[in-house]
Image (cartoon, rainbow, N blue to C red):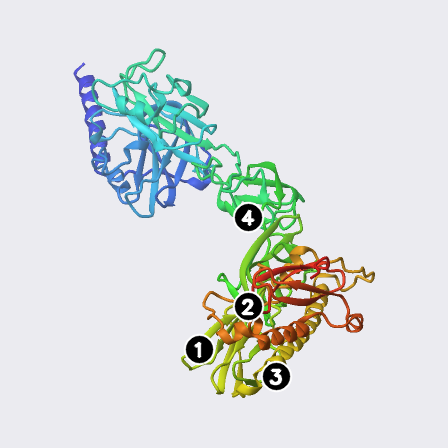
Amino acid sequence: MRGASTLVMVIILASTTHVTASSKGVISCTSAELGSLPGNWSLDDQTCIRVDLGEHVPGTTLNFEISADEEVDILLFPSNTVSVYQNEQSYRMDSVWISESVFESFIGSGQWHWEVPSDRDQTRWYLVIDNLAHPEDSGEGAQGGQSTEITLNGGLISHEQFTLSDSIHRVGPGDFSVVHGPFSVDEGTFVEIHARTMQGLPDIFVMTETAFSYYSPSSNWSSSLRIASADMLRVTNEMYSPWEAESTNGEELYIVVDNRPGPGGGGPGNSPIAVTVTVTLTPIISPSITSEADLESVDVGSWINLSSSETPNKSNQIPDSGFKWDTNGDGITDHIGAEIEQIWEEPGNYTLTLSATSLDSRTEAISRTIRVADLSDPEISIGTSETVTKGFGEQLSISASFSDNWGVQSLDWLLDGEVLWSNYTLTEPISTLVLEVENSYSPGPHVISLVVFDKSGRSTKKDVQVNFIDVTSPEIHSFESQIEVDQGIPVILQIFAQDNESQSLQYTWTLELGTENEVEFSGSQVIHQFNTEGPQNVVCKVENDAGLSSYAEILVIVNSRDSESSLATRLIAAFSIIVLLIIFAAAFLFFNNSVRRRMSEITEPEEEEETESPMPPTTQMQKQMWGGPDESPFQAQSFEPITREPSPEILELLEVEAKETSNPEGDQESRLLDELTTMPHQEEMADSSGNRVRKKCENCSKPFEILLPEGVEEAYTNCPYCNSEQLVSVRDTL
């Protein structure tokens, strides 16, 4: 009995000696490499497997799948601390192993993803499957004692395009871990959550930022505002949930691993959990076309902005190069980019197509019809904006440039609304109007307009104010610049002037210029008696409507007369006056007929072949021709109120005063004067053209005669003696 006890003690001591010796040695594990996986091992008691995972940069994700029929410890070390484990030192601390990827006493099947941490540079990593009892274990984890069958597979993970998170999460009881957030997604995007459990019974929630603010506190928290349609409750092994984002109100989202109690149907939250959560998006691809312009009606030839800015793209699922534009419906891409500038140079209906290709090679397209029409009027630029003044006989030149969004068709130049010149075959975007300012145009302001028509019939009109003025003074016909008269004998002074650019001319006579007898008269003809012997200066100023004047200067030499031959002198003077009146009437008729012919040439079209006999002048025309009240270039003389009273000698000569019956010599002079002023013989009248009418002045009772042109039955004229206006008619007789 004692021998048996001794034998047992020896065995125990020997066993103790072996363990102690082992604890002081270096652990030697079966080696494997990541590239050789998958692998199967029959792991004996107190042995291990060390898998070299290779060197990896931060952010690299590795996938592991394991199966064990007995409890083992799964440990992960970086290359600089794996020796602590192999030297049987204390390795059960975060500074030595990577606790996120440590699973002690694991049995069964499991899968997890591990992401290389970012707290270090590129590092070599080792995964150890441990079936040993270590002195530093303090009884924790698997202690070996039996062999186990191990199957291990692993490798690098190549993530899909829109993977937000893919790693394992370790959460203690009553706590939570944020898988990813906050982040934004477009309405209609699918949020795909894939969970793989290694330990415990976790819940996975999706929350808006508002809901998370109620859930995240350590006390008085609530999960009631989570998005229940995205719940993944009580994940036991592996679970997949595609959730379509909706009703987020534009808020950012959180994805949470929950290990708190509840909600109903969820995990109890009373033990640690370890779960790998992979979050991947399938963003919505829904292209949208927008523009600052109205795409229902686009102006031809104008650049417009086309944008895809309203296309859902919160996940940056579509790069700028993924937007392709076909602007004419031919199926060929015309532009690439999120925003483009486009112009259609011809009116019509165009099919505009925008296609969007995401980073994961999904493509969607949208089309719409664009109506392109001419909506803009032509634009005109004229070189001047001020009033242009030109004189008659000068040349007016106005240049303009024009443009249109489609093209100009024709143009018209107008003067006061009447077309001057048109061009229906435009080849250049400029035009110049050259206008000779003729006296057929009325003086004063006018409007020159340019009207430009485009190909669609739209037009623009631009005006220029012009002013036609008379720049030439009246033209005075030839006259005698020096005459001789007898002292005290009335003399007729007259000149003829012409100005086709004026409606009327003003005649102002200044007689006996520079003497104390200086006097002024108005009218183209005056009768004056010079009483001072010697040379006298007479000036006639002719002024037109523009205020321009011409001057006629006449030197009058006044000769003295013999008192004893006064009767003969008076008779000669009277006869001279009658002759001058006859000459004046003939010249006046000739001048009047010339003017009428000139005005007829102006007013009648040059191409008119058929001529008509002129109608007899109306009474108003006769007034204008024969010195009626209307002012005219053909007006007979009229005396202004400044006219001085004639001397008694003139009144006696013209018999304005009552005759003295006691003066036989005066009676004889009166009879002679009457004979001189009476109508000429019938033979003389037959030689004249028109009707000679003899009239007694209703004012001074002196007889006078006048020759009316053919067809003129009555007219107004001035009495040659007292200058009063008289109506003469073929029916008048003395």
Badge number at residue 518: 1
Label 3–label 1 contact, CB within 8 A:
no
Q: Indicate whether 367 appears above or below 516.
A: above
Residue under numbered circle 3: 568
User: Residue 28, percent across and down?
Assistant: 31, 39
Q: Indicate whether 621 appears above or below 639.
A: above
User: Residue 336, percent across and down?
Assistant: 55, 48
Q: Residue at x 47, y 40 (%)?
A: 309
Residue situated furthest front in the rendering: 662
Q: Which of marks 4 and 3 is nearer the N terminus?
A: 4
Q: Which residue is drawn at 55% across and 85% down?
A: 486
Secondary structure type for disc 4: strand
Residue under numbered circle 4: 336
Q: Distance between the residues labelled 2 and 1?
A: 24 Å
Q: How far apart are marks 2 and 3 (CA)?
A: 19 Å
Q: Residue at x 31, y 48 (%)?
A: 121
User: Residue 395, percent across and down?
Assistant: 60, 71
Secondary structure type for disc 3: helix
| Front in this rendered view, residue 246 or 499 | 499
Q: Can residue 621 be seen in this view?
A: yes
Tell me if mark 1 has few (under 14), some (14-19) or many (20+) residues whose alpha carbon lies within 10 angstroms of its own.
Answer: few
Label 1–label 4 contact, CB within 8 A:
no
Q: Based on the displayed image, in which of its 4 quarters is residue 585 positioned?
A: bottom right
Q: How far apart are marks 1 and 4 (CA)?
A: 96 Å
Badge number at residue 656: 2
